Structures are given as C-alpha cells and as structure tokens.
Image (cartoon, helix red, strand yellow):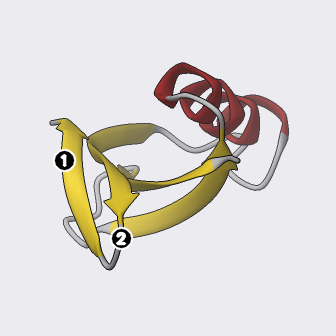
Amino acid sequence: MADKYRFKYTVDSEKRNHYRYYSANSPETAKSMFEETCNSGGLIGFKVEIKEISKKDKSEWKKIIH
C-alpha cells in the first residue's frame, strides 16, 4: 500500500508556502514525481524550492526531509 507524502515548497520569490500531495511507495519515488511535475507538469517554468517533505503517519504529518 502506498504512503502519502506532502511537499511544502515556494515558487519563484514568493514567501508564501505551497503544498502538493503524492501517494508513493517510498520518499524517493514521491520526490521523483514532484520533480516530474516541476520539469514537465504544472510547475514547468517556475523556480521551485522544496522546504519540507512529510509523510502521513495515521492522522498526522511527520517531517522526513527539511
């Protein structure tokens, strides 16, 4: 069963955080999916900086990369 991952990131020079969610079997796979979104999906052409990656554990999000 796939886990849920949340990416907290900024776009260009905005200070406001944005979030994207992915279901994947590992954090590496989720990160690849996010990178694909940046390179050829909805975030193409934007400068994106990942601030945090979290994994859903029951009902809460736990940071795995920050």
| Front-most of residues 16 and 63 | 63
* Residue 43 left/right relative to 3: right
Instruction: Specify which label sits upstream in the sequence, 2 or 1.
Output: 2
Residue 2: % across, % down: 67, 47
| Residue under the image location 47 percent in, 38 percent down | 47
From the viewer's side, name the closer residue of 50 and 30. 30
Disc number for residue 43 = none
Q: Is residue 37 above or below residue 60?
A: above
Q: Position of residue 50 (x, y in %)?
A: 33, 40
* Residue 62 rendering spot, x and y as whole percentages: 20, 55
Quick one: SS at disc 2? loop
Q: Which residue is mark 1?
A: 63
Residue drawn at x 15%, y 36% is 66
Q: Secondary structure at mark 1?
A: strand
Mark 2 surroundings: few (<14), some (14-19) or many (≥20) residues within 10 A: few
Q: Is residue 63 visible?
A: yes
Q: Residue furthest right?
A: 40
Q: Measuring from the top left, give residue 18's x and y in whole percent.
A: 40, 68
In the image, residue 50 above or below residue 26: below
How packed is label 1: few (under 14 Cα within 10 Å), some, or many (20 or more)? some
Residue 22: quarter of image: bottom right
Amino acid type shown at disc 1: Lys
Q: Is residue 9 visible?
A: no
Q: Which residue is mark 2?
A: 58
In the image, residue 61 sits, relative to residue 4, either above or below, namely: below
Q: Residue furthest bottom?
A: 59
**Left or right, 51 with reference to 2:** left
The alpha-carbon separation of the residues under discs 2 and 1 comes to: 14 Å
In the image, what residue type sits under mark 2? Lys
Q: Nearer the viewer, mark 2 or mark 1?
A: 2
